[in-house]
C-alpha cells in the first residue's frame, strides 16, 4: 500500500520540489506549483469497459516560469488490459521537454518520450510536432496499478481547455487489441485567460498535500 494515499494512487501534488542532474552531478533545483487540475473517472480503454482514472494537471516551474502539463493514468481494473502510450496534444509551434517522477512508492517510470502521435512500437515513427508521446506500461494485472507523474514542459504562455488534450493507447504487446482514445483537458494557448476562467474542481475534492521527490531531470 502506498503510504501517501492508502494504495489508491489518487495523489494530488500541490507542490513538487525537484532536482536536475547531469550524470550524478546536481545541475539545478526548482519547484512546480499547481495552477489547475481536474480528474476524469471511468475512462474506457476497450469500448464500454470503464478502465482508468486520469488526472490532468498544470504546474508553473519556479526555475524558469514555464508551464508544465502533467498526466496521471491509473489503470484500476485487473483484466489483462494495459496502457502503453500516453499522449499530450497541442504543442505545434512550442518547445517541449518531457520528464517523470514518483508521487507514491509504486508509481511507474517513463520508458521513453518523443514528438509523435504514432501508436506503433517500432523504433522509427513519424514526427508530429503537436503530440508528445510518453511510454509506460500501466497494468494492474502486471503489478503496475497506476502511473507515475508524466510531465511535458513548454514555452507556451498560457493554457486553455481543449477537446483533445490527453490520449492513451494499448499497443497489443501481449496479444491484446490495439486500441485507445483521448479525452479533453488542458492544452497550451497563446491567449492569456481572464481571471477565474479555470475554477475547475478545486473545491471539495481533497488536496492531499505536498509531494517532494528528486527523480528525473528535465
Image (tube, grey):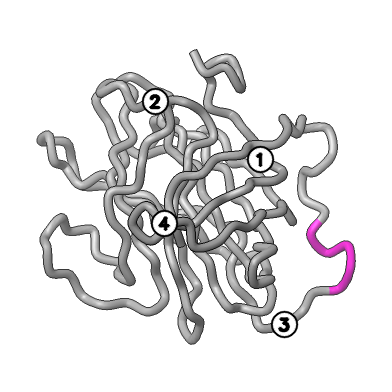
Q: Which residue is mark 3?
A: 191
Q: Nearer the viewer, mark 1 or mark 3?
A: 1
**Disc 4, SS:** strand
Q: Quadrant of residue 81?
A: top left
Q: Nearer the viewer, residue 92 or 77?
A: 92
Badge 3 vs badge 2, beta-carbon distance below 8 Å: no
Please report whichever mark, 1 or 4, sits nearer to the chain's N-terminal start.
1
| Residue 11 makes an appearance in the image | yes
N-terminal-most mark, 4 or 3: 4
How many labels, in total? Answer: 4
Instruction: Measure how far apart labels 4 and 3 are at the Cα level.
Output: 38 Å
Q: Earlier in the sequence, mark 3 or mark 2?
A: 2
Residue 9 relative to residue 209: left or right: left
- Counting from the top left corner in percent of width and height, residue 88 is at 46, 61
For the residues labelled 2 and 4, the Cα–Cα distance comes to 32 Å
Identity of the residue drawn at 63% across and 47% down? 17
Q: CA distance from mark 1 to mark 4?
A: 26 Å
Segment colored magenta? 194-198
* Real-space Cα separation, disc 3 to disc 2, in angstroms: 37 Å
Q: Nearer the viewer, mark 2 or mark 4?
A: 4
At 31% from the left and 29% from the top, the residue drawn is 139
Distance of mark 2 from mark 1, alpha carbons?
19 Å
Mark in the foreground, 2 or 1: 1
Residue 145 shows which numbered tag?
A: 2
Residue under circle 1? Answer: 13
Left or right: residue 41 versus residue 15 is: left
The kind of secondary structure the magenta stretch mainly shows is: loop
Amino acid at each position: 500500500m502506498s503510504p501517501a494515499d492508502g494504495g489508491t494512487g489518487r495523489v494530488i501534488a500541490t507542490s513538487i520540489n525537484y532536482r536536475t542532474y547531469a550524470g550524478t552531478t546536481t545541475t539545478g533545483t526548482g519547484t512546480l506549483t499547481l495552477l489547475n487540475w481536474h480528474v476524469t473517472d471511468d475512462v474506457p480503454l476497450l469500448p464500454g469497459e470503464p478502465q482508468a482514472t486520469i488526472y490532468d494537471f498544470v504546474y508553473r516551474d519556479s526555475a524558469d516560469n514555464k508551464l508544465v502539463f502533467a498526466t496521471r493514468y491509473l489503470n484500476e481494473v485487473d483484466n489483462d488490459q494495459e496502457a502503453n502510450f500516453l499522449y499530450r496534444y497541442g504543442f505545434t509551434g512550442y518547445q517541449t521537454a518531457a520528464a517523470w517522477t514518483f508521487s507514491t512508492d509504486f508509481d511507474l517510470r517513463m520508458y521513453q518520450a518523443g514528438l509523435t502521435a504514432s501508436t506503433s512500437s517500432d523504433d522509427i515513427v513519424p514526427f508530429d510536432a503537436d503530440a508528445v508521446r510518453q511510454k509506460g506500461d500501466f497494468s494492474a494485472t502486471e503489478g503496475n496499478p497506476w502511473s507515475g507523474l508524466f510531465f511535458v514542459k513548454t514555452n507556451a504562455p498560457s493554457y486553455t481547455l481543449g477537446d483533445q488534450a490527453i490520449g492513451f493507447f494499448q499497443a497489443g504487446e501481449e496479444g491484446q487489441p490495439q486500441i485507445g482514445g483521448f479525452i479533453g483537458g488542458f492544452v497550451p494557448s497563446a491567449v492569456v485567460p481572464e481571471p477565474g476562467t479555470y475554477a475547475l474542481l478545486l473545491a471539495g475534492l481533497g488536496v492531499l498535500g505536498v509531494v517532494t521527490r528528486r527523480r528525473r531531470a528535465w
